[in-house]
Every structure is written in structure tokens, then in C-alpha cells.
Amino acid sequence: MSIKKSVGERVFDVFNYLFLTLFALCTFLPFVYVVAASFATEAQVSTGELFLIPDEFSLDAYRYIFANNSILRALSVSVYVTVVGTIVNLLFTTTFAYSLSRRDLIGREIILNGIIFTMMFSGGMIPTYILVKNLGLLNSLWSLILPGAISAFNLIVVKNFFQELPGELMESARIDGCSDLGVFFKIVLPLSLPVLATFGLFYAVGHWNAYFSALLYINDSTKWPLQVLLRQLIMLSQGSIGDESQLDPTFVKPPEQTVKMAIIVVGTVPILMVYPFLQKHFTKGVLVGALKG
Amino acid sequence: MSSNSSSQLTLNVQKPAKSPRARAWAKIKKDKWLYILMIPGILYFLIFAYGPMWGVLIAFQEYSPFLGMAKSEWVGFLHFKNFFTDPDFMKLLINTLTLSLYNLLFYFPAPIILALLLNEVRHSGFKRVIQTFIYIPHFISIVIVVSITYVFLTTEGGVINDLVFKLTGERINFLGSPQWFRPLYLLQIIWKETGWGTIIFLAALAGVDVSLYEAAIVDGANRWQQLWHITLPAIKSTIITMLILRMGSVLNSGFEHIFLMTNSLNRSVAEVFDTYVYNMGITQGSFSYSTAVGLFKSLVGITLIQLANFLAKKAGETGLY
């Protein structure tokens, strides 16, 4: 259907495309700059040039970072918490969601209302802190994993998804003598891989980015995840990025600004790598359809 | 009623009539695996969601960690009274409400406008590319966002300040001055969340029947009229729902975000209820007092959501529930 566009509409279109492109660039340019700056050499920094694409590359900042114990330690803490945490999240969320997806379950409404209530009212920071303390979880990495094990919102979306699965499959399995447990593991889970992947990635990103709970519950600096260390180094300018014992003595320390840029890149790159996989799923409307339901 | 005629083979095999209770128990036994599968989830919510709710009661005590809740003294509304008469209360209220107001005025319309603009794009490839880019900041941690802000704006070697210096010969202390706090905070939120915020509106827009547009074009409607009469009404209820939710969180502020951006220099405008609870409770150990403040905040929030929901229903919208 070709409708002739008026001049005004064409002008609008041009401006629209321009504006959207500009906006998209704005979301991306800061990263480009940070990445470029992390490769900067001493010479470039001292001339104070504004540059996007450096002509000289130097990996010094990265060499410096990865020779540094506290950064490597924080990285491994973050990886551990992300992997274990996501497994716990998925386990707790899917089992609960599956049982709740069975509409004929006795007690279902009460439980669902109880869950929705927790979305509106919570005990707050201090009572939760006291609870974690009383459970003996202070300074343990489990304090980063257990208190957030299930997101009520995710639970409800996954439950809705399970509800939409074809009931006949499960019925026929049950007639064949399969227990509910078997149905869950052998039929429901394999059918739900896209949803598991999507929410697994959401939970994982949440763990990787988590910062405040570690600040609150963990005082032992050897157990800090990456984001906490990031804040220390960049915003508080505390802590030396200075454990140079493993470096070649002839190695010249790169400029501080460059090192900070490199640390930011290290904190962001895992997310950016995971992002394309996430993107595929949620734009397909997995979320949206379930949101409407 | 069992049949008494046995002259033919009747398939009237009747189980003895069960009471509803007995039937219920039989069902529960049959579903036993479902209940077992629920155990981790139920335990989680009982311990970590409902447990702390119980702890809210310490707001009415003079809680001491050594004595625990059972043995700490009860002081009734003392903490609430102290809080409302504290000179800082007004300042906190103003800071919190101002940030919420700015958020409502400047951030809230942004995803809507962006979604509307995206909706006007006919080229689906372009649209997808743009969407890919604008969603990214949502997945970046707030620590990274503030870190980037720091390295860009710092007076010693930050890109922006170097530029300002070249232009004016001076450097601006963005990070430490009270007047820059709110604009920076808003810019960060807009940068980080606008893209992601479009999803829910795009979803509503995608649900609009294309034939409505076609009919309108046949009737001679131009793009503005199409926007006004078809597009906007389509997202009206989504906007109202989001507004209701926003109302409920008027006393909330992005705690982590503000916490990261606050320093001793801009504290006078940056301190909000949430950071006050943290400072009083964790840093200074006034557990009961800060819990009282937190409780006050949550109750106001719930009341406001109810109020907003009620008003929305009165205006003819479906409301949140």
C-alpha cells in the first residue's frame, strides 16, 4: 500500500531517524571512550588529547591489573557468586513455579497471595540485616546468594509460562505412571529451556552487578566481589592498585586514569558478552507475553 | 446410591462416598511431590521475606543486639516522635520529594516519547539495531555507571573537565557541588533506564490493530491525528499503571545510586530517607530508630499506591488490581 507522504512527514522521518541514531550513539559512546582510554599510553595521557581511537596501543594497564592479587581475587569471588547464585536461583524458582502452576493444587491461592504481599511490603534493610546476622551469614558469600534466592516477579512470570505448557503432555506422562517429580524433570524443564536461559541470564547479571549486599554483609576485603572493589579503587581512590610484587621490575606503572578505565572495562565486558544471548530472548516477547498474562 | 439390580453387568462401581475433607487429604497425598518441590520456595519466603517483617517490630523497642527482640525494652512510638521532630526530617522530606518530582517530570516521559518515536519507524531492521543499543545500559551495574561518571567528570584529568578548561580556563567540581547533584543523578537515570523502559510501552503499541490506522488514513487523518486518536489511547492504561506504581514509590529513591553519588560535599541535597536509614542503622547502630524510619516510609508507600489505584479506578481506568 503506497501512500504518498507529505513533505512534513518526510521531514519528521528524517529527524526521527537522526534523533534515534543520536540517542543510540549516546548510550554507546561512553563505553567506546572508556575502552579506548584503557589502551592509552603515557604519552597520550600527558598531552591531554581528546581521542576516540588511539593511534598507539598499550596493554600495560591490563597487564598491571591481572598481575594484581586483589583484583584477581575479587574477580573469582564474583564468578563464584554468579555461578552458584544463579544455580540456586533457578532451582528455587522453577520448583516453586512448577508446583504453583498446577491450578488444582490445594492451598495455591493462599500461597500466591502471600507471595504477592511480599512484593508490596518488606521488613526493610535493618531487620533483614539483623536476620542475616542472626543466621550467622555475615562475612559469608552465602549472604549474597540466599537472601535474594527468589525474585517474586520472576517466580510469577515463570509460573505463568508453565501454565501455558500443553497439559496433555503431562497428563499422558502421568497416565504412564510418571510421578509429578518425573514430569517436572523429564518434561517440563526440557520444554522450558528458553525461559530458563532468559531468567538464568537475568539472575546472573544481577549477581555480577551486585554491590550493596556485599558492602553490607561482608567486611572481609578478601571476599569482596568485583563491583565493591571497583568502587574502592575508582571512587574512593583507596587501596593501592599497588601489589606489584608479581610484575617485572622494569615494568613502568601506567597512568592512574588508564588503569581505572581498564578496571571499568573488566567489570563491564562479561555483561556485554552475555548480552547478545539475552537480547534474542526478551525481544521475542517471552517476557512481554508473560507480563500480559 | 449403589444399584441393587445385579441381573446385568453394571459398571456402577461406586467408591464409598467421601467427605470433602477426606477427598482433600487424598488429593494432597496424590500431589505430594508438588508439595515437596515447593519446600525450598516456601522456606525461602518464610525466612527471608516474612522473617524480616516480624523484625519490623523493633521499631517500637529500644533494640539491643545483645538482648535480642525478646528481652529488649518496649518504647512505643518514641522513635517516630523523635523522627518527626528532628530538624533533619524536613530536609530529608524535601530532598526525597524533590528527586521524585524531578524523576516524574524528566525521566517518566522519556521512555514514552522514545517508544512513540520508535513506533514511527517503518524500517524494522533499523528499529532492531536501535533497540539493541538502547537496552545495553540497563544491564550495566550502577557502580560502573557512577564510575564512568567519576572518571569523566573528575577535576583531575576527566575528559569533560579538560574540555571545560580548554573553553573557559576553569574546572567545574561536578562531583562535589550540591547544585550538580540532581542534574547528574537525573542524567544518569535517563541514560541507564530510558531504553529499557520503552519495552512495556512498545508492547502496548504492538497490540494496536493495524486496520485502525488504515481506516484512519482512508478517512484522511494525518500522522498527528493518528497519534492523538489511535496511538495515545492505546498506551493510556499502560501509562496510568506505571504512574500508579511511581506514586507508590514517591518516598523511595534509588538507594544504591544515591549512596554512590553522595559525598561529604553534596550531602545537604543528597541525603534522602533511604540513605538516612542506612547511616543511622548500619553506620551508627541505631537499629530501632532507623527501622522506625523505614517502616514509616513503607507504610506511606502502600497508602499512596492504594490511593493512586483508587483514583485511577474512579477515573474509569482498570487500575493495578
Image (cartoon, helix red, strand yellow):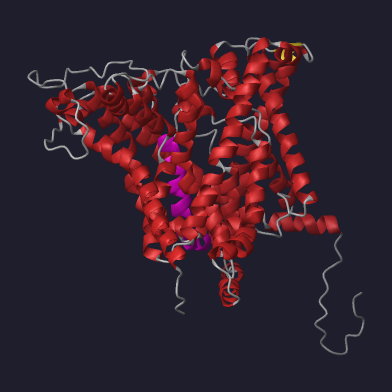
Outermost residue toward the front? Answer: A7
- Which x, y percent locates residue A232? 36, 20
Residue A289 colored magenta?
no
- Which x, y percent locates residue A123? 66, 28
Residue nearest the observer in this picture, A276 or A151? A276
A115 lies above or below A186:
above
Q: Is residue A212 visible?
A: yes
Residue nearest the observer in this picture, A9 or A67? A9
Q: Quadrant of the N terminus of chain B?
A: bottom right
Q: Is residue A213 visible?
A: no
Outermost residue toward the bottom? Answer: B8
- The residue depicted at 81 percent of the width and 87 percent of the height is B9
A31 sits to left or right of A117: left
- The residue depicted at 47 percent of the width and 43 percent of the height is A203
A5 lies above or below B166:
below
- The residue depicted at 65 percent of the width and 33 percent of the height is B250
A104 lies above or below B273:
below
- Which x, y percent locates residue A217? 49, 22
- Which x, y percent locates residue B191? 43, 40
Residue nearest the observer in this picture, B55 or A257? A257
Q: Main secondary structure of the magenta part?
A: helix
Residue A77: quadrant of the picture: top left
- The residue depicted at 80 percent of the width and 49 percent of the height is B314
Residue A262: quadrant of the picture: top left
Q: Which residues are magenta?
A: A185-209
A81 sits to left or right of A73: right
Residue A205 colored magenta?
yes
